[in-house]
Image: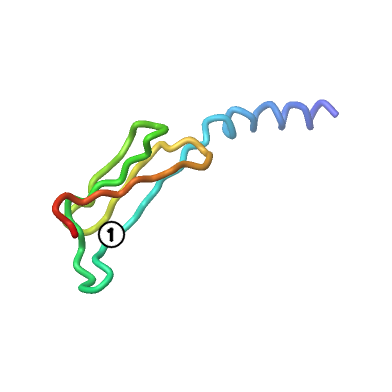
Amino acid sequence: MKKLIILIISIMPLLATAQNTFTATLKDAETKEILIGATAYLPALKIGASIDTSGKLIIKNIPSGKYEIQFSYTGYA
């Protein structure tokens, strides 16, 4: 029984600090053009990122959970 308790205690800090990464690629639905400079924002966490020149967006260190994500691109209609 002591071994089981020690195992659970050693795993709990790993679970409590779990962080996630959100990755995305944003493209125009019709032209398939990458929307360089578009942004993604998680209002609840007050963090975000922009699409880079290769079309990738990465937001790191997101705590586990469900979040609303907002995408925007200035001048896009």
Q: Is residue 66 left or right of residue 22?
A: right
Residue at 28% x, 69% y is 29
Residue in front for this viewpoint, 36 or 71: 71
Q: Farthest residue to the front: give it.
A: 77
* Residue 10 on image: x %, y %: 65, 28
* Residue 60 on image: x %, y %: 37, 40
Q: Is residue 49 above or below residue 2?
A: below
Q: Is residue 7 left or right of residue 47?
A: right
Residue at 39% x, 45% y is 69
Residue in front for this viewpoint, 52 or 41: 41
Q: Is residue 52 left or right of residue 17?
A: left
* Residue 9 on image: x %, y %: 69, 26
- Label 1 secondary element: loop
Q: Amino acid at mark 1?
A: Leu
Q: Please rate how many residues cluster around mark 1, counting C-alpha atoms within 10 Å: few if below 14, some from 14 to 19, many from 20.
A: some
The image quarter containing residue 34 is: bottom left
The quarter of the rendered structure image containing the C terminus is bottom left
Q: Farthest residue to the bottom: give it.
A: 30
* Residue 55 on image: x %, y %: 23, 58
Q: Which residue is mark 1?
A: 26
Residue at 52% x, 31% y is 17
